[in-house]
Structure formats: structure tokens, C-alpha cells
Image (cartoon, rainbow, N blue to C red):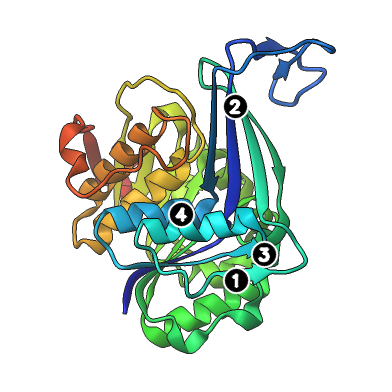
Amino acid sequence: MYDVITIGAATRDVFLLSDHFRVAKDKHLSSFGEVLYFNLGSKNELKEVILTTGGGATNAAVTFARQGLKTACICRVGDEESGHDVVRALEHEGIATEFVQHDTKSPTAYSTILTTKKGERVILTKRGASDHIDVRDIPTAQLHARWLYISSVAGNVALLKKVFAVAHAHGARIAFNPGIRELEKGLRALEPLLRSVDVLFINQEEAAQLTGISYKKEKAVFQKLDAIVRGIVVMTRGSKGVVVSDGKTVYHAGIPRAPIKGRTGAGDAFGSGFIAGLVQGKDIPFAIQLGTANATSVIQHLSAKRGILHTGGLGKWPRVTVQSASLKNHG
């Protein structure tokens, strides 16, 4: 019996940091209003290069393992050196790799993360094998766990349905951190799944997209999601922190001030830290504290995994203030 089995993407990541990466505002070139640019023909010196592994499933698995939880990971990698590196990195953390799938046709997913000295980033990605987790290769009879932590599975609804069915059959609880391709399916397609979710992670823009309600109308967003999700809804708000609802009480918390070296992996770190707190039998305020500390530590490193906390690591971080109020009185 595992404490947690994670399911989702595994990637080979290369982080490139340079003081010469330039950011400029240009609404004509980017829907975000800013662009990272290079002068054609120029040579730009790199300050730091880090070769590591990433992806929602492996990042979360490392959090759980470092918190002393028995952990396994379901992901798909290519049958080449990058894929072997992903497996070795998981094994180094004490994570079971018996459920890792090996793809002989598609390469391991790959990302290059271009990072400025202020922590802004552009990610170049090739999805590769992570897009092809094979539902037929999941040994359902062996997936005994207290929790399943599900991140993006490239919008594979058939896979989600099977994993959710396995969770029901084995009495496992479900944490779900959907990606863009899951959210693109829309609320109608996801609602049957969300009714079985114990903890849903979503950011404020995604919440607005999913519900059709502006994220500025928090009470209405949570009322709609709480009516569907059987458990806890966690909505992250970037630099403004997080809002959590268990259907009766709403919890607000900010984030501590900390230097930012890179934001990659912060969402995975918060979500897995939050669930680690619950798996350890703690309450929602503690889960918020652990998730926040884990994410704050991660953003101070140029990697999605380097800053992930070990057991006892929470003690070195200042506690954020967690405020609570009844959902009925939530503004």
C-alpha cells in the first residue's frame, strides 16, 4: 500500500539563466503584453545551466517522498538516455518506478526554460511520450494507495475515467490538478469526474474559464465549484496567495516575501505540499502552510525540484497568516 501515487507528465528539463535575456513590452507580439527577445546574430553568455527532470507527476512525487511518504509514480518516458535519467532521478528519491511506462516510438518530453535574472521565463517544450500514457498499461489491481495525485494527462479523459474508477474500487482519495488540455474539455465533460474529487487545484484564471464566472467574484466561483466538487477546492492567486474552501469554511492566505530565481514548479510544489499535509493527518491551515513553504523554497532555485522541502523543513520558514470565515459570509 502506497501513501500516494502520482500520475502525469515526466520531462527532461534544461534551465538557462542569463543576464542578457531581455524583456520588453509589446502587445502586438504577445497576448501577455511582454516578450523575451534576442538580437539576431548575437551571442548571449549564459550565467547558469541546469540539466534536471520535471513534469507534474515527478515533481509532486519528490515532495511526497521527501515528506517521508511511500510514493510511486505513473508517467511515460522515451526509451533513451533522457527517459533513463527520469527513472534514475525518481529512484534516487526512493520513489517506486514499477508503474513508469517506456515508449519506444516517442521521446521523453523535453523543456528548455529561458530565465531572466528577475525570474521571468519562457518555456520551449516538446510534449513527447508524456502525451501517450497508455491506459491499457496501468495495472489497476496493483494501484493500492491512500491518495492518487493526478496532474495533467494531455486531456486523456479515458485515462482519467479509468484512474478515477480504480480510486473508487480501492478506496483511495483523489487530488486533481488539471492542466490546460483537461480544462479545454469544459465543465460539462469534467463535472462527472469533479464530483469524485477530494481536492481540486486550480488557479484563478482557470477557475474563471471553467465556471464562466469572473475570478473577481470569488463567492460565486466557490459556490459553483463547491456544488460540484465533493471535497476541497483550492484556488491559487499568484502573488496574492491562495483561497481554499471545504464547502463550509473559506481560508485565505498570502505568501511570504522571498527572492525569486525561477517560478517553474511552484504550482506543483504548493499542490503536493498541501496534499502531503493532509496525508499526514493535519488540517487545512497546516496544509496551506506546508504547501506555501514548499513553493516558496522552490522559487528560490533554478529548478522545479532542488528546493523541495524534506521532512522537518517547514520549521525554517515564517508562517503565513491563514484567515478563515464561513462561506456564507464570504464576500
Residue matched to label 2: 16
Identify the mark at residue 79; answer none if there is no mark: 3
The answer to which image quadrant residue 318 occupies is top left
In the displayed structure, 180 sits above or below 199; it is: above
Amino acid, disc 2: Leu
Q: In this figure, what is the number of numbered marks?
A: 4
Q: Earlier in the sequence, mark 3 or mark 2?
A: 2
Q: Position of residue 276 (x, y in %)?
A: 29, 56
Classify the position of the C terminus by image quarter. top left
Viewer-nearest of discs 3 and 2 = 3
The span from disc 1 to disc 3 (Cα, nearest Å) is 9 Å
Check if mark 3's residue and mark 2's residue have beta carbons within 8 Å: no
Amino acid, disc 1: Gln
Tell me if 282 is positioned left or right of 247 in this view: left
Task: Let me know if residue 39 appears in the view.
Answer: yes
Q: Earlier in the sequence, mark 4 or mark 2?
A: 2
Mark 2 Cα shell of 10 Å, populated few (<14), some (14-19), many (≥20):
some
Residue in the image at 17% along x and 46% along y: 312
Q: Earlier in the sequence, mark 4 or mark 1?
A: 4
Q: Secondary structure at mark 1?
A: strand
In the displayed structure, 239 sits above or below 306; it is: above
Viewer-closest of 54 and 4: 54
Q: Secondary structure at mark 3?
A: loop
Residue matched to label 4: 89
Q: Earlier in the sequence, mark 1 or mark 2?
A: 2
The span from disc 4 to disc 3 (Cα, nearest Å) is 15 Å
Tell me if 172 is positioned left or right of 156 in this view: left
Residue in the image at 35% along x and 43% along y: 308
Tell me if 37 is positioned left or right of 63 in this view: right
Amino acid, disc 4: Ala
Q: Earlier in the sequence, mark 4 or mark 3?
A: 3
Tell me if 251 is positioned left or right of 72 in this view: left
